[in-house]
Image: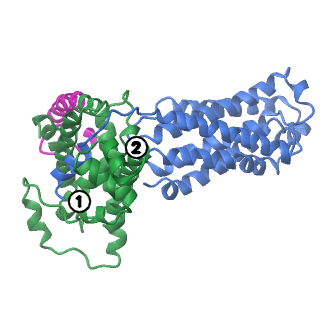
């Protein structure tokens, strides 16, 4: 994680209520002026975050645009920075639900990948990224609050876990298992192209599909995977 | 699967993509729905015979501009709200402007008219049917705009739904105006606005369900 991000994120506040769940209104949008941490003076927080945001803004934008242009390593770096950003963002907001963090990080990465065509290069990329993160966070909290009406409230133990921060916990959900549940026309293109790194042309020959069908298979398969991650949690 | 593995999976073989401008899909959807809405209006109601004569009446063009500007602002709003993190910016002005202007015209018309004429200015001959027809004609637009928005990623769902509904309603009103003979500002400021508000409300209500992803 670059220092820019940690500065930005240290300015975030928590809005985690009694049971780790809050009703988050759609208009409750993340803005530094609202969520400035009380321990930090407001001016400090704003100048730091503005500085950090400019750094991450330019860097992330450059990486994403190169990625879209076909530069796989730039795209990998983009997703890696994002995952650190998302993890920190979510840890602060899911203090009572630490077990959800890594699942949601993965769900968000999938969402970013699938929705990358909705990024307008004229808009700030951080606004785009945080809008996605907030949307998925609110979505998760809604799903959970609905589920918790039927289930027991969370253990008190989760408070202990919340204090440990730093290492990457494993996601509970196994995407590989979800992948196995996809139909062949989506699973095989993903396995050959995205997991084994074969070319689209080679994959098309191997499974006897047209190249465009392989591309569509990858795209739809990832979308189906993202949909499964939502319905599972 | 570890997050690191997912990263690798997503970043493997990212071929240079022609990112198709999402607005193209949007434009196509709206154009075809406009054609469908016009056909619906022509079939059910018919273009009025006095249309050619009205082309020289300033109020006719005021009415067309009112619907067109509202529709355009609604479309831009819906398109922006369908992409995460976009700002509404001038859209608010584009929506509030025509509305306030029409109400101002309506107020002036009412103040300047004789008491016995006011009823006619407000109710015209078709007040009760107008909002219903606008809603009906806007249905194909509503469907196609929501379809286009679903292809993107709205994050403020009820607001995005409301914007889509406004766009559908205002464009529906624009089509309906080829049939509707009413030209009084008070009439337009009430019944046209109501006709546009119905799809707006439906959009706001259905947005959280239809636009979720």
Per the model, the C-alpha gap separating discs 2 and 1 is 32 Å
- Residue at 11% of width from left, 36% of height from top? A2
Determine the secondary structure under disc 1. helix
Q: Is residue A58 magenta?
A: yes
Q: Nearer the viewer, residue A40 or B199?
A: B199
Q: Residue B105: percent from the left, percent from the top? A: 74, 29
Q: Residue A205: percent from the left, percent from the top? A: 35, 47
Residue B34: image quadrant is: top right
| Relative vertical location of residue B196 with respect to residue B95 in this rendering, above or below | below
Q: Nearer the viewer, residue B195 or A203?
A: A203
Residue A12 appears in view: no
Specify the subunit that label 1 lies on: A
| Residue, disc 1 | A103
Residue B165 appears in view: yes
Residue A211 numbered mark, or none? 2
Determine the secondary structure under disc 2. helix
Q: Which residues are magenta?
A: A32-59
Q: Earlier in the sequence, mark 2 or mark 1?
A: 1
Report the label total. 2
Q: Residue A6: percent from the left, percent from the top? A: 13, 40
Chain that the image shows in blue: B
Residue B126 numbered mark, or none? none
According to the rendering, which colour does chain A have? green
Q: Quadrant for the C terminus of chain B, please.
A: bottom left
- Residue at 82% of width from left, 41% of height from top? B122
**Cβ atoms at labels 2 and 1 below 8 Å apart:** no
Q: Nearer the viewer, residue B153 or A228?
A: A228
Residue at the top extreme of this rendering: B56
Specify the subunit that label 2 lies on: A
Residue B206: image quadrant is: bottom right
């Amino acid at each position: 994680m670059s220092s820019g991000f940690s500065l930005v994120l240290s300015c975030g506040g928590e809005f985690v209520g009694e049971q780790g769940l809050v009703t988050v209104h759609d208009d409750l949008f993340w803005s530094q002026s609202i969520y400035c941490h009380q321990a930090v003076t407001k001016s400090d927080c704003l100048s730091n975050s503005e500085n950090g945001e400019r750094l991450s803004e330019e860097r992330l934008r450059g990486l994403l645009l190169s990625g879209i242009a076909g530069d796989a390593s730039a795209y990998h770096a983009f997703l890696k920075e994002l995952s650190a950003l998302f993890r920190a963002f979510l840890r602060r907001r899911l203090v009572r639900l630490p077990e959800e963090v890594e699942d949601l990080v993965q769900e968000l990465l999938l969402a970013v990948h699938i929705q990358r065509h909705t990024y307008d290069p004229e808009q700030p990329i951080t606004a785009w990224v945080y809008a996605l993160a907030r949307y998925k966070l609110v979505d998760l909290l809604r799903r959970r609050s609905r589920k918790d009406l039927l289930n027991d409230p969370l253990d008190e133990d989760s408070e202990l876990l919340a204090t440990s921060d730093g290492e990457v916990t494993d996601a509970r959900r196994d995407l590989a298992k979800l992948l196995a549940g996809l139909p062949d026309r989506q699973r095989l293109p993903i396995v050959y192209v995205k997991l084994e790194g074969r070319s689209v042309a080679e994959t098309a020959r191997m499974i006897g599909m047209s190249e465009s069908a392989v591309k569509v298979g990858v795209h739809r398969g990832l979308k189906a995977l993202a949909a499964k991650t939502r319905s599972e949690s | 699967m570890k997050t690191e593995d997912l990263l690798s999976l997503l970043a493997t073989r990212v071929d240079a993509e022609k990112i198709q401008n999402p607005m193209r899909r949007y434009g196509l959807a709206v154009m075809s729905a406009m054609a469908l809405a016009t056909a619906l209006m022509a079939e059910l109601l018919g273009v009025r015979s006095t249309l050619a004569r009205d082309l020289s009446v300033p109020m006719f063009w005021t009415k067309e501009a009112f619907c067109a500007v509202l529709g355009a602002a609604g479309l831009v709003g819906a398109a922006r709200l369908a992409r995460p993190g976009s700002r509404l910016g001038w859209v608010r002005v584009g929506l509030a402007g025509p509305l306030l202007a029409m109400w101002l015209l309506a107020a002036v018309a009412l103040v300047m008219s004789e008491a016995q004429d006011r009823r006619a200015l407000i109710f015209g001959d078709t007040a009760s049917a107008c909002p219903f027809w606008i809603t009906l004609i806007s249905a194909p637009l509503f469907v196609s705009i929501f379809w286009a928005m679903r292809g993107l990623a709205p994050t403020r769902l009820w607001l995005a739904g409301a914007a889509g509904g406004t766009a559908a309603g205002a464009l529906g009103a624009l089509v309906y105006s080829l049939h509707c003979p009413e030209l009084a500002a008070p009439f337009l400021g009430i019944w046209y606005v109501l006709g546009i508000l119905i799809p707006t409300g439906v959009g706001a209500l259905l947005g959280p369900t239809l636009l979720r992803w």
